[in-house]
Image (cartoon, rainbow, N blue to C red):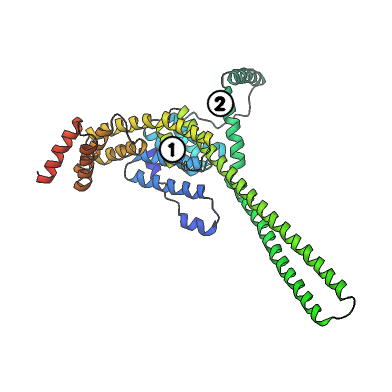
Amino acid sequence: MTDFKQEIKTYSPIDLDRLLKTNIDMPDNLKNSVLLYNKALDNIRIKSEDIAIIELKKAISLNPDFCEAINLLGLLYTTINENNLARNCFEKVLSIDPQDRKASEYLRLLDNDYKRPGNNIKVKHKEKSENKKSNVKNVKNKKKDNKKDSIFTELSYSISNILKMNAAKYLIGFLAGLLVFFAISTIAGSKESAKDVSNVIDNRRKNQSSIDYEEKYNQLAEENNALQKQLEDLQNQLEDLQNQLEGLQKTAQNYTNLSQLLLIEKKVSGGDYVGAADMLVAFNAEGLNETEKEKYESLRKQAMEKAAQQMYNEGRDLYKKKQYGEALEKFNKVVAYVDEWKNSSATIYYIGVCHQELKDKDKALEAFNKVIERYPSSSFAKYAKSRVDSINSGT
């Protein structure tokens, strides 16, 4: 194995239907990560490696232990000469699964002198001592310079423990469901018992004429009252359980939202505006509390326009090279990121030209007319009118 591009071709889609047959309760995040992985392979086959990289990043964010996706992402990085990013991917796989043969082999191909940590056992005592001193010094400096990173890491770790594999939510739902079922069953039994007591009272009224009839009647009436009280208590318990369940579900959703927002914030801090924008587009902002809404809007302001500018520049470069299909994908992402910005008229115009060059006249006309209607005084509106006239005249 000497060619990373050739190695990429050995990766094949995962049969999700087959997995679901043996894993009926597979969480949605794992299903979605597999779907994104398969879509990435489809985009690789049509030479859309940049889109494949985005999809693999999403898959890994949903399932951080997805070694196959991490290895494939590393291989894609090597094809665009991002060997440091590729090395990080392969080392991450080995941190998850030290026995992963592919990751070890890829690292050796990147660096012939690469040795896995822990292989060189015979280290001199003096070297160990010096390394320990150096490490202690580095740790102290790192703690001093990175307090914010420490806070972020601790918060992310706490949230990931709470939400890991969604186990907390499933356990909460399961236990609450059992409690609700028990309460409903008891209430139903209590109603039947109360009904039986009433029937007994009626029968004894008719059939008994002795002096102790009234005493028995009173005794049964007291039992009936006790059962009615028990019924009311169980109904109150059921209501409390339902309120607790709703509260737990809301808390779990809040943790999920916060976890996603922290991941997006980390991408923004690292300058990965396109990755952050993709996550923001897919993020469901309904039901956010005020704090989460402020964080969400702040991240959009920081990431969306910068990501749009990056996609616009890449689209223009591809457009100039007459790679209209790839350019169209970039311009469409710009529209998904921002509704209005400084290059909106140009973006929509280029979308129309790409459709025209790809022989899709209807979509081309739709884009050109949109430029004319929304930006009538822009220079691109004039260009769009000329294109419309040319299409309509058949020239």
Q: Residue at x 37, y 29 (%)?
A: 306
Residue 109 as seen in the image, left or right of residue 44: right
Q: Position of residue 369 (x, y in %)?
A: 20, 41
Quarter in which the N terminus is drawn: top left
User: As rendered, which of 344 and 128 lies closer to the eye?
Assistant: 344
Query: In the picture shown, does residue 236 fall above or below 148?
Result: below
Q: Residue at x 41, y 42 (%)?
A: 55
**Amino acid on which the number 2 mark rests in the picture:** Asp
- The residue tagged with tag 1: helix, strand or loop? helix
The mark that comes first in sequence, 1 or 2, is 2
Residue picked out by circle 2: 149
Crowding near the residue tagged with mark 2, few <14, some 14–19, many ≥20 C-alpha atoms within 10 Å: few
Residue picked out by circle 1: 280
Residue 224 as seen in the image, left or right of residue 214: left
The answer to which image quadrant residue 254 occupies is top right
Q: Position of residue 366 (x, y in %)?
A: 22, 44
